[in-house]
Amino acid sequence: MEALIAFGAALVTLRLSGLLATRWRERRSPHLLAWSAGLAAYALGTAAIAWGAAVGWNAGTFRVYYLFGGLLTAPLLGAGSLLGAGRAVAGPVVLVYAGLATGVALGVPLESPVGGAAIPEAQEHLAFFPARILALVGNIAGTIALVGVSVASLRRRPVGNTLLLGGFALAAAGSALAGLGVTGSAISVAVAAVLLYAGTVSRA
C-alpha cells in the first residue's frame, strides 16, 4: 500500500512540475523554473520511496532518495519563492548548492549496506559531514525562504497561498526529515502533493 500511495504522489507532483515548466516556457519567469525543478526533485524522491517499498532498498535507490528528497527539494522551492519576490541572487546561489549537493550525494561513501523495505535512516548510512550537515543547512534555508515569502504575500492570494504554504511546508519538512535521517510516511508526501497541486491550480 505504501508503494502505491508514494507512486501516486510522485505522479501528481510530476504533473504539477510539468504544468509549471509549461508556464515558465510561456512567461520566462525564473521562479517558475525553480519551482518546477523543486517539484520534479520531490517527485523523484517520492518515486524512490515507492520503488524501495515495492522491491526493496539498495544503495542506488537510497542515493536518489537522499539527493532529490533530502538535499534538493526544499532549497529549490525556497529559491523559487525568493525569485518570485524579486531576489535574483537566489538563482546562482541555488545552482551552486545543487551542484555541490549532487556531488556529495553521488560521491560520499555509505557507512553501512542499504537494504530492506523501510525508508533508510540517513544517520545509519551517511556521516554527519558533509552529507547530513549539507541537508540541514539547505533545508533550513529553503524552508525559511518559502514560508517567509508565502506568509508575506498571504493577504494578496489567501486561498492559493494557504494551500501552497501547507504543501510547501509539508514537503520541505519531509525533505528535512529525510536529510536528517528521520523516517517518513508515504501518506505525508501524498498530502503534500495534493496541497501543492490544489494551491497552484487555484492561483492559475
Image (spheres, helix red, strand yellow):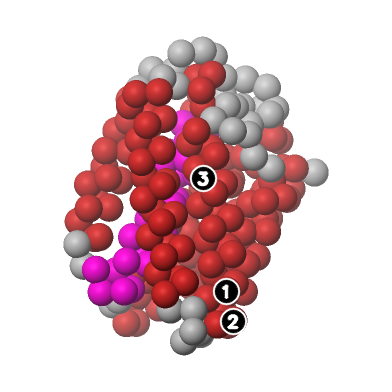
Q: Residue 116: x, y in percent?
A: 68, 22
Quadrant of the rendered structure where residue 153 is?
A: bottom left
Describe residue 193's horizontal placement relative to residue 89 as left or right: right
Residue 145 visible in image: yes
Give the residues in magenta: 61-87
Question: Given the image, on which type of amino acid does mark 1 rest?
Answer: Thr
Q: Which residue is mark 1?
A: 162
Foreground tag (2 vs 3): 2
Q: Residue 161: x, y in percent?
A: 52, 76
Residue 11 visible in image: no
Q: Residue 175: x, y in percent?
A: 51, 45
Quadrant of the rendered structure where residue 82 is?
A: bottom left
**Number of the label disc, if any, that sits on residue 186:** none
Callouts 2 and 3 close, C-beta under 8 Å: no
Q: Which residue is mark 3?
A: 175
Asked if residue 8 is positioned above or below residue 149 in the image, the reply reads above
Query: Tag 3: Cα neighbours inside 10 Å, few (<14), some, or many (≥20)?
Result: many
Question: Given the image, on which type of amino acid does mark 2 rest?
Answer: Val
Label 2: which secondary element: helix
Q: Which residue is mark 2?
A: 159
Furthest residue toward right:
1
Query: Tag 2: Cα neighbours inside 10 Å, few (<14), some, or many (≥20)?
Result: some
**Mark 2 or mark 3: whose residue is earlier in sequence:** 2
Describe residue 15's horizontal placement relative to residue 7 as left or right: left
